Each structure stands twice: as C-alpha cells, then as structure tokens.
C-alpha cells in the first residue's frame, strides 16, 4: 500500500497539536522524576545508584524496546498504539502510588510507564514524519517541545502535589491526568491513499507469495495428493488383505456403493490434508523470507559508516547527557546550595530551555544551507564541555546557567529523527530509528545509575560528571570523523527501493 504524498499542512497540524499534548502528558512525570527521586531517597532509604534506576528505567525501557515499538506502529498504526499506550502510562503512574518498596517501582514506574512512553514517542514521530516533508524539521521541533514543557510544568506541579497530598496522592493525580492521552491518540488519523482499502499486507509482501503459490501450487499439490494416495491405498490394501485374505473379496467391496462413497470421502479428506500441509509450508517459507529480509536490511544499514557512528554517538550521548535532568537537584543539595536561593527549580530551567532548543534547532534544520548532521555534532561537543564544567559550579547562579545550556543543547532530540531520515531515507526510517532508539535506551538506563554509583563511591559528583562529559565528547568526535564525506555521496551508497508501479505490474501479470 502506498502512502499519499506528505501534505505539509492540513490535518498534519492537528497531528502536531495532539502529538505535542501526548508527549506533554506522557513524558512530564518521567522526565521531571528528579523531584520524585529526592522523595524516594527519603522514603525507602536506598543508595543513590539503586534509586536512580527508577528514573533511568522510565526513560530507557521505552527506547530499549524501540524495535518492538516500531513493529507495533508499522503493524497496527499510530492511533491504536497511542490509545493502548495511554492506558499503560496512566495505569503505571497510579500503580506506583501504592509501591511498598523500590523494587515495585522498578516494575510499575520504570517498566510499565517507560514502555508506554516508548510506544507513544514512536507513534508520534512516525505519523508526523508521514504528514510532513519540507517542514519536517519544524513539525518535529514543535511536537518534541511537548516533553520539555511537561518537564517545566510537572517539576513544579509534582512539588506542589507532594506538599498537599503526599507522594502517593501526587502519583495518583498525575496518572489521572495521563488519561487525556486517549482522546489525543484518537485524532491521529493515518495518512493512506483514498482509493486503496486497508489490506492485510502490502503488495511488496504479496508478490513472493503469488509467485510461489501460482507457480508451484499445482505441481506440489498433485505430488502431495499422490503421496497420500499411495500411502493410504497401501494401508487399505493391507487391511483388507489381512481381514479377508482374498483379493477378489476386496475388489467386490470396492464395487459396493457404500464403499464408493467412503472412497470419495477419503479422497476429499486427502485433498484437504494436502492443501493444509502445503499452506503451512508456504507460510513458513514466507515468514522465513521476511526474517531474512529484515536481517539483510539491518546489515545494509550498518554498512553505512555514518549510521554506525550515529548509534555509537547516541549511546554515549545518553550515558552522559541524561543524568543532569534527573540528578541536578541533588547536585545542588550536595553542593550545599540553600533552598532559599532557589528562585526556579533547576529541573524547570532544564525543561524550558530544552523546549526552546528543540524549537530553534528544528527551525534551523529546515534551512537548506545548514547541514543538519554537523549541527547535531556541534550540540554534542558543546554539551560535553558543559558537563565537564558542572564540578566547578558551586553556586545556584552557576548551576542555573549550566542547566539552561544543557537544556538548550538537549533540544537536539528534535533534529535527531531529521538526521536519521537524511542518513538512511524515509523508507528505512522506522527500521533505523528503532535500532538507534534501542541504543539510546541502553544509554538512558545506564547513565544515572553510573553517576549515582560514582557518588556512592567518592561522595562527590565531580568524577561522575567528568566521565559524562568525556562520553558525550567522544561520541561527537566519532560522528564527526564518519561524516566527513558529503551528504550526496552517502545517498548514492544507499540501495534504492523498487518502484511501486513495478510491484503492482508483476502482481497483475501473475
């Protein structure tokens, strides 16, 4: 089935609006989990490294499951996935309000909420890329600001709710707010061709089946029936011979009308068995062929050196770049910054500047004279330097400035799908993006616990953030070395997909 040409407007702006609110509602609490992190430290009395697993799982599990999320969106569509994920996010948040220990939170908040967020993120990004082409950078920037605005609002909202209703009441109310994802998801109308119904599978998948069925069916079916006839006939002959001991009596029984009817039923049964056997054989062949095609496409993606460098960079970026949004409040408390000096929570500063960064970087990505890949590399290098400067900040003002810088540079998430599309093409976006998000989730899951363990070991965050800055810098320089060849050279190296007209022509000729 072919998609319509991206309209770059129309209902696409409704998609942008509902995707914005979807990311706002689902990512608000998990990204602003730093407020809850302090409460969980006091409530359960566990170490910083172990407690940090809750927030890191909430952000990492969904990304780790990105290949599965991409498969779900490709199979069922963005709308059903978004509605189902809304129930997951809301249920996980409400369930976390009854957590008796930190291990229960690993499941309810880390896995359930994290997986729901991953499904929603994949659904919103995929459907937005389908509706926009020339304005894709702006559209992705707008929807990705939803999570940043959610971080800004939820950081203050969760603090206020904890003061009035306690930690459990806060999670119940936040979970109830997440139910608003359901009406947002219902508005994600798929972009499909108007003259083509919703088939069970695409024409590209049907072609091998039609060739194999129509070219081989008669021969294979006849061979299967002959084999069954031989085995069944031999079996009947042996039975009649043993029972009667006479060939003539067997021939007389065959001339009996009742025996003739029995023979017809036997032939019908044999034909059905042969058809079902052949169907199972063809189904197994088709599934094996799809598996081989998926593995072949994955190998082809990793042959692209920019894509290979991109997955290393995104992994190292999330190992080092994610911990500040979770631990910055505790960094300030460890630096003996007084609560009276907190004009605005540091997490809120990160959130609002991330929204600004996503929007501005998304707009810059649409300018043809700007190489989006080099823009992304520049954000990685600058972020690595900012992370290395955190150990030298001992006042609220310096921490607030660094939080703003880190938040703005974290806005490069809005151009990451754009970079991926330019690297592998829109046809392979879902496949490539799923792989990249898997490594991003791995980095998200490992980053905060590693920083927490460094603190438990040294009782200071200095070495931890030097390590984080080094990881991000290393990823940026690896991607820079791989991207020295021009964009057009990389595009020529990518295999072009077969035109849709050729596929339908082959299917009709069969």
Image: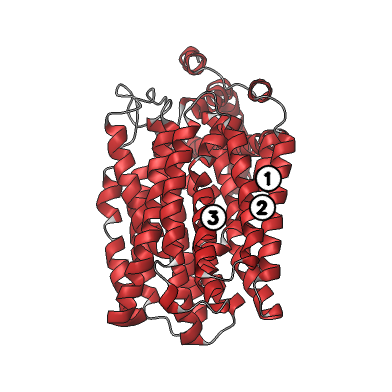
Residue assigned mark 3: 406
Between 244 and 124, the one lying in front of the other is 124
Label 2 with label 1: CB-CB less than 8 Å: yes
Which quadrant of the figure has residue 302?
top right
The image position of residue 171, as x and y in percent, is: 34, 73
- Circle 3 residues within 10 Å: few <14, some 14–19, many ≥20: many
The residue located at (37%, 54%) in the rendering is 149
Residue assigned mark 1: 476
Give the structural element (helix, strand or loop) at label 2: helix
The residue located at (45%, 62%) in the rendering is 31
As measured in the structure, the alpha-carbon distance from the residue carrying label 3 to the one carrying label 1 is 15 Å
Q: Is residue 157 above or below residue 68?
A: below
Q: Is residue 493 visible?
A: yes
Residue assigned mark 2: 472
- Circle 1 residues within 10 Å: few <14, some 14–19, many ≥20: many
Q: Is residue 354 above or below residue 271?
A: below
Give the structural element (helix, strand or loop) at label 3: helix
Q: Is residue 77 visible?
A: no
Which quadrant of the figure has residue 373?
top right
Q: Is residue 441 above or below residue 330?
A: above
């Amino acid at each position: 089935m072919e998609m319509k040409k991206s309209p770059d407007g129309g209902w696409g702006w409704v998609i942008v609006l509902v995707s914005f609110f979807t990311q706002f509602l689902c990512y608000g609490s998990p990204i602003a989990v730093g407020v809850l992190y302090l409460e969980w430290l006091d409530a359960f009395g566990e170490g910083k490294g172990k407690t940090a697993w809750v927030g890191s799982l909430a952000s990492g599990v969904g990304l780790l499951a990105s290949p599965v999320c991409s498969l779900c969106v490709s199979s069922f569509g963005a709308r059903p996935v978004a509605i189902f994920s809304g129930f997951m996010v809301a249920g996980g948040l409400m369930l976390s309000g009854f957590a008796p220990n930190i291990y229960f939170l690993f499941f309810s908040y880390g896995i359930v909420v994290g997986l729901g967020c991953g499904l929603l993120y994949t659904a919103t990004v995929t459907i937005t890329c389908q509706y926009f082409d020339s304005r894709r950078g702006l559209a992705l920037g707008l929807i990705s600001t939803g999570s940043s605005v959610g971080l800004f609002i939820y950081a203050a909202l969760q603090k206020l709710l904890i003061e009035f209703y306690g930690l459990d009441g806060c999670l119940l109310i936040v979970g109830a707010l997440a139910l608003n994802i359901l009406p947002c998801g219902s508005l994600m109308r798929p972009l499909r061709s108007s003259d083509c119904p919703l088939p069970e599978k695409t024409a590209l998948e049907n072609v091998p089946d039609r060739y194999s069925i129509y070219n081989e069916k008669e021969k294979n079916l006849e061979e299967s029936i002959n084999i069954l006839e031989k085995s069944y006939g031999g079996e009947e002959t042996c039975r009649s011979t043993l029972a009667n001991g006479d060939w003539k009596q067997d021939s007389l029984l065959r001339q009996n009308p009742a025996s003739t009817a029995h023979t017809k039923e036997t032939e019908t049964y044999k034909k059905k068995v042969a058809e079902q056997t052949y169907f199972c054989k063809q189904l197994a062949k088709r599934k094996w062929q799809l598996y081989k095609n998926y593995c072949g496409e994955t190998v082809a993606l990793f042959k692209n050196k920019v894509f290979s460098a991109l997955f290393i960079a995104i992994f190292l970026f999330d190992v080092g770049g994610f911990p500040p949004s979770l631990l910055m409040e505790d960094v300030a408390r460890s630096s003996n910054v007084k609560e009276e000096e907190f004009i605005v929570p540091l997490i809120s500063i990160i959130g609002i500047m991330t929204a600004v960064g996503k929007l501005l970087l998304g707009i810059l990505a649409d300018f043809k004279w700007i190489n989006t890949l080099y823009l992304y590399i520049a954000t990685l290098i600058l972020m690595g330097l900012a992370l290395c400067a955190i150990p030298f900040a001992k006042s609220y003002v310096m921490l607030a400035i660094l939080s703003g810088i880190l938040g703005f540079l974290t806005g490069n998430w809005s151009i990451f799908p754009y970079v991926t599309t330019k690297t592998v093409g829109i046809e392979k976006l879902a496949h490539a993006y799923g792989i990249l998000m898997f490594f991003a989730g791995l980095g998200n899951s490992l980053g905060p616990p590693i920083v927490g363990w460094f603190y438990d070991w040294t009782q200071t965050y200095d070495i931890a953030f030097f390590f984080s800055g080094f990881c991000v810098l290393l990823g940026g320089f690896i991607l820079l070395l791989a991207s020295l060849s021009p964009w057009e050279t990389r595009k020529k190296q990518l295999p072009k997909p077969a035109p849709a007209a050729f596929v339908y022509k082959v299917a009709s000729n069969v």
